[in-house]
Structures are given as C-alpha cells and as structure tokens.
Amino acid sequence: MSWLLRDGTVLASAQVADTFAQRARGLLGRRGYEGAMVFPDTRMVHTLGMHFPIDVAFCDRDLKVVDTVTMRPWRLGRPRRGGRMVIEAEAGAFGRWDLTAGDQLEIRP
C-alpha cells in the first residue's frame, strides 16, 4: 500500500496500477472505492462498465495536477495536454481533499 500526499500531508491511501492486469481492471466491477488509484503512463480514461462516478486527475510526469474532472459511468475521458499519469477516486473525494489543477502530489510507500 502507498500513500497520496500533497505538501507532506496524506490525502488518501493509494494503489499504483503498474501491471497490465491492474491497469485493465482499474476500478471496474467495484461498487465504491476508498482511496486513490494511480495509473502511470496513462493519458486517457473511461468509465465503461463502472457502477459509480469518479474524480479523475490528469498529472504530468512529476505528479503535478494538470486538470481534474468528474466522470459519470459510461463515459470516455480525453487526454489532457501535458497529462502523462492519471489518478482516480470515487466522485467527491477531490472536493474533500481540496485537490485542484496546479497541486504538486507525491506517492510514498
């Protein structure tokens, strides 16, 4: 298990989907999700087959948030300029974490 941090403050537990199988499954088939899921080397997302809306943060290589969006189930998310990594969480999480574009994030074990 890892942690998602901003300015040294823990925002949530984080699971890094760094294998093909983990990336393919993502949040599919779940009824909800506590924490954040991190998808390295990802620019585009979808919510096809999802059971709940999600917050999505598009980040650059250094984990600086480029853009955020909330996606309902059965949608496609277009790549964002400069986005090289994606962080997903259950909708509403980014509001609780006060996560916005420009935030510098960090993943720690």
Image: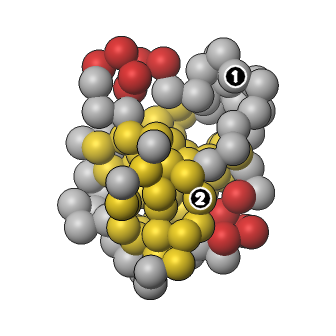
Classify mark 1: residues with Cα within 10 Å, few (<14), some (14-19) or many (20+): few
Q: Quadrant of the N terminus?
A: top left
Q: Quadrant of residue 22?
A: top left
Image height of 94 relative to 89, above or below: below
Numbered disc in front, either 1 or 2: 2
**What number is the disc on residue 80?**
none
Q: What residue would you read off at disc 1?
A: 30
Residue located 73% across and 50% down the image: 91
* Residue 23 appears in the figure: yes
Residue located 38% across and 26% down the image: 23
Image height of 87 relative to 97, above or below: above
Q: Mark 1: which amino acid?
A: Arg
The answer to whether residue 82 is left or right of residue 16 is left
The answer to whether residue 18 is left or right of residue 22 is left
N-terminal label among 1 and 2 = 2
Front in this rendered view, residue 38 or 85: 38
CA gap between label 1 and label 2 equals 18 Å
Q: Kindly state the secondary structure of the residue where label 2 is placed.
A: strand
The answer to whether residue 87 is left or right of residue 64 is right
- The x and y percentages for residue 73 are 71, 30
Q: What residue would you read off at disc 2?
A: 12
Residue located 50% across and 27% down the image: 26
* Residue 48 appears in the figure: no
Q: Mark 2: which amino acid?
A: Ala
- The x and y percentages for residue 62 are 24, 67
Residue located 49% across and 49% down the image: 14
- The x and y percentages for residue 56 are 55, 51
Q: Kindly state the secondary structure of the residue where label 1 is placed.
A: loop
